[in-house]
Amino acid sequence: MGASGTTLRYCTVAGDEVATTREQARADLIIEGLPVRVPPTYRGQWSYPGLFWAATTDRTLVYESLLALDRLWLADFDPGIMGIGS
């Protein structure tokens, strides 16, 4: 689609899939949208994916590592944060 041929895909809050370029993408719709996938979990894996409920946004967010989970906790407790997306 774009000059480099890269397409950005995301799901809106209504569940509709949108394909667009990075330049035309709307960050607010991406952040409000639904998770595209939930990372799989299995015994012995190196990362620790899961779901995190954020009070800031009153919704569940997907994380793929303990580092990402730590960042979500920090953002959720920061009073200056208006929204969180993962």
Image (cartoon, grey):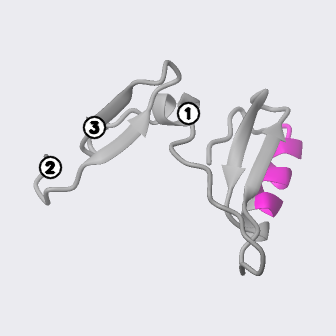
Query: In the rendered view, does 20 fall on the left or right side of 47?
Result: left
Q: Nearer the viewer, mark 2 or mark 3?
A: 3
* Disc 1: which residue: 34
**Residue 65 rendering spot, x and y as whole percentages:** 72, 68
Q: Which residues are magenta?
A: 69-79
Q: Are marks 2 and 3 in contact (CB under 8 Å)?
A: no
Q: Position of residue 10 (x, y in %)?
A: 41, 39
Which residue, given by chain and number where applicable, does mark 3 sit on? 19
State which mark lies toward you, 2 or 1: 1
Disc ID at residue 2: 2
Residue 28 in view, yes or no = yes
Identify the residue at image location x=68%, y=34%: 83
In three-dimensional space, the C-alpha distance between marks 3 and 1, rounded to whole angstroms, equals: 14 Å
Q: Is residue 76 magenta?
A: yes
Q: Position of residue 42 (x, y in %)?
A: 72, 69
Query: Which residue is at the far left?
Result: 3
Q: Is residue 45 above or below residue 55?
A: below
